[in-house]
Amino acid sequence: MAHSLRPAVRRHLSALRMLLVLTVITGVLYPLAVTGVAQAAFPHQANGSVVTRDGKAVGSSLLGQSFDLPKKNPDDAGEAARPDPRFFQPRPSAGAYDPLASGASNLGPNDPGLVKAIAQRRAAVAAFDGVRPQDVPADALTASGSGLDPDVSTAYAYEQVNRVAEARGLPVADVRALVADHVHGRDLGFLGEPRVNVLDLNRALDGLSG
């Protein structure tokens, strides 16, 4: 009986040794190596592409965020957020720009709730930006798959120029030129669509306004 157990014991010991070796390699050495290379070669990206102003973190260029007016009653959780007309606005977010609630609405294109939400957003954006409802771009009406898209289309960015310029008392031509300077082209020249990072644009806008 004892003789028949020895091969099984040896196999289990070999498996245990292999488990320990692979745990050290894949669970300790590899993560440390990847982290070290990332911190040495790409420290900004490895630390979340954090954007700072006056030494204080104001967001990440990889994550969308809201640009709203302060609440009249900060303690009122039911008070609806109001977009700040002085800033370029991002596309809608199904998770209220909360990274812990990242995700889409999961509503189909014919879902009555989504159809109603799009109609409401179209009317609200048209009134806010002073444009015709039929001129509101699609990304102003629908959330991204993550709900945290940091970019908007060039069409949506340019649509907001007149409203932002008026709210800040700036020449329309200067604000339009600022948007043009922040347009990112297609990746590798053919992937995706031209886009504008909202946080970067708003930071530059603050600089333009002094």
Image (cartoon, rainbow, N blue to C red):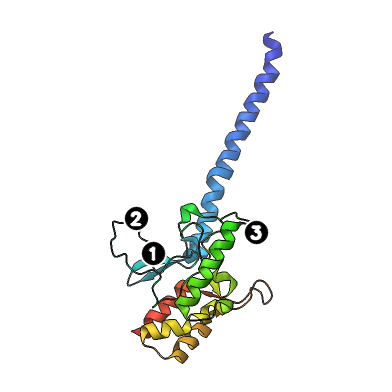
Residue sitting at x 47%, y 79%: 129
Residue 172, percent from left and from top: 45, 89
> Which of the pair 185/143 is nearer the observer?
143
Circle 2 residue: 77
Residue sitting at x 52%, y 78%: 157
210 left or right of 179 in image: left
Contact, mark 3 vs mark 2 (Cβ under 8 Å): no
Closest to the camera, between mark 3 and mark 1, is 3
Q: Quadrant of residue 3?
A: top right
Residue 21 seen in this snapshot: yes
Asked which secondary structure carries label 1, the reply is loop
Name above or below for residue 19 compared with residue 28: above
Screen quadrant of the N terminus: top right
Q: Amino acid at mark 1?
A: Ala
94 left or right of 191 in image: left
Name above or below for residue 45 compared with residue 32: below
> Which of the pair 71/188 is nearer the observer?
71
Circle 1 residue: 81
Asked which secondary structure carries label 2, the reply is loop
